[in-house]
Image (spheres, grey):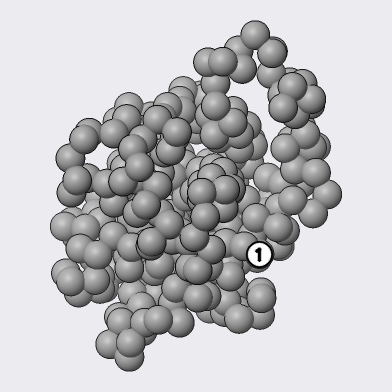
Amino acid sequence: FVVLHNSIGVDSNVVVRLTLGMIFTRRVLEGCRRKLEELLQGSIKDISKVLQEIKVNSIQGSGADFMVQYEVGFMASSAEKTISYPNIDKLGEAHVKFIMENYQLGRKSQGRTRRDVFFWCFDRTCHEITHIVQGLAEQKDKNAYSMSAEHDASIGAYSLLWAISKDPKLKAIFPPGFASEVLLKTVADDLQSSSKWDEKVEKEYTTWVDSFGCEAPSNKTCEDNVLASSFCGRLSSDYFTKDDKELAKIFSLLFKDRTGDVYAKKISPPKSIFRGIKRLV
């Protein structure tokens, strides 16, 4: 434990105040800042300065049962420039149980739950920082469930994770093979989750993707947080690329000359980058 903290440059005196989730989410955020500065220069004013203002904190449980499904997920506030992650050691047993029953996909154990939430610090952070950038670009999503915003935060998330894993300054948190391990586990989960969709849900997903997020799934689908999350994960997998030029194309489509109502400007999805989830597992 001490060796791990020393290797990532954290003073042992702060171990008692910082969880691994907080530490690694901050380091992933650091890499995302550098990559997004490169990708978004010229698209968003003062992007470098504003990205430096983003903070990380942990989600505190409300005690309300109906909030559990939301408190186990990562969140972003563009107004507060904050990414929040679920620290399951501070949340209740109901939260751990919910993750095990809805996200473990057969691997129901306390240890695997903690490992999976730790992995989320990598791919979910790449999703949430894009939500914050949407706020910086003053983009507006009129859909009640913000499904255009969810589409846009998802389409480049896994690719962004892969890109920052090559950052020389992040070698300590991306030892050889680790990014591949995180992505393989995450993509396998996405494939298994989406394999449970019925024909109607599959059609809703296809329509959502083909419209570049502008035709939202049904209210029933959007209100099911686990199902809506599976749409996001599947999209991140379907559009995964290791090519920097393709990643730049994705973020150009998302943010270049695109402010205000996101439905006002029709965007054709970059089908040349869509290679499908099954090639990854």
**Is 9 situated left or right of 248 in this image?**
right
Identify the image quadrant of residue 11.
top right
Q: Residue flagged by tag 1: what amino acid is it?
A: Leu
**As drawn, 37 above or below 264:** above
Residue at horizontal 35 percent and vertical 54 percent from the top:
98
Q: Position of residue 150 (x, y in %)?
A: 35, 57
Identify the image quadrant of residue 225.
bottom left
**As drawn, 180 above or below 239:** above
**As drawn, 52 above or below 115:** above
Q: Nearer the viewer, residue 242 or 39?
A: 242
Q: Which residue is mark 1?
A: 184
Q: Position of residue 31 (x, y in %)?
A: 64, 37
* Residue 245 shows in this picture: no
Q: Position of residue 55 (x, y in %)?
A: 45, 25
Q: Nearer the viewer, residue 217 or 252?
A: 217
**Is 95 situated left or right of 123 in this image?**
left
Instruction: Find the residue positioned furthest to the top.
Output: 13
**As drawn, 69 above or below 11:** below
Instruction: Find the residue positioned furthest to the bottom.
Output: 199
Identify the image quadrant of residue 131.
top left
